[in-house]
Amino acid sequence: MRVKSNLIVSLGIAVSCASAYAQTNTNPDQQPSMAETAKEFDRLLRVSDQLHRSTLSAPRASTSLSPVLRAIPEFRKATADLRDAVGNSEGMRAPLQSIEKLIKPFTEYFKELNLKSPVPDIQELKTYSPKDLVWETLTTAERVDNNLQIANRLLRESNQSGAVTVKTLQFYGEIDSDLKRLKWLVGKVAAQR
């Protein structure tokens, strides 16, 4: 929006300068009429609007954001379901499947951002007992859930402003890394059930 406003102001100044130059011309036959000046201004405004639209990125980011925003509250519910299942020693298959399904929209969105998130160290997790893997899965899911609540606000703000800070991208990278860890953990725990 700021670029468009700057272009409109620049065009207005250019038309004003052209009009001022025309008024200093002493030959009245060569001066443009007010209708011609308005017509020229409208033409320049259309050209600047076309130029502005051509510099905008494709609406891909905004369409890929809606599944992410929908998945955030669903992820919170799936994490709560997993917490209940672990606490009650109930079957965890359904909550694990829900979490696994909900990881996809986030990883796809982060992939579009070309994040260079670190790959989790799986070697340390291979020494965990099955019970420890369950608790690590729950802990990781809760950490991801908490970070997604913060990311929800950041995603909406960046979508409105059209800008993302470097610090925000680093934060998204941390979430992406935890999601990779969670995906591995969910697969491992589900295979043991």
Image (cartoon, rainbow, N blue to C red):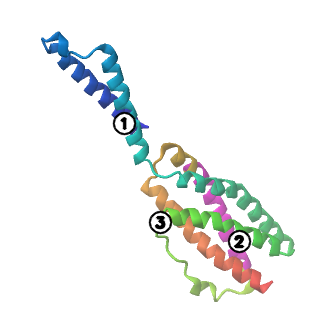
Res. 72 image quadrant: bottom right
Identify the mark nearer the N-term, 3 or 1. 1
Q: Residue at x 70, y 77 (%)?
A: 186
Give the residue drawn at x 36%, y 30%.
43
Q: Residue at x 35, y 23 (%)?
A: 39
Callout 1: 10 Å neighbours few (<14), some, many (20+)? Answer: many
Asked which quadrant contains residue 120, the reply is: bottom right
Measured as percent of width and height from the top left, residue 163 is found at 45, 49
Query: What amino acid is at disc 3?
Result: Asn
Q: How many marks?
A: 3
The residue to which callout 1 is attached is 48
Relative height, residue 15 to residue 88 (above, below)? above
Q: What range of the chain is rendered magenta?
A: 134-154
Report x, y in % for residue 137.
69, 74
Say whether disc 1 or disc 2 marks the residue closer to the N-terminus. 1
Callout 2: SS: helix
Residue 78 shows up from this direction: yes
Query: Between 77 and 55, which is closer to the camera in this rendering?
Result: 55
In this view, the residue in front, 56 or 32, is 32
Q: Secondary structure at mark 1?
A: helix
The Cα–Cα distance between marks 3 and 2, rounded to whole angstroms, is 22 Å
Residue 148 appears left or right of 189: left
* Amino acid type of the residue tagged 1 in the rendering: Ser
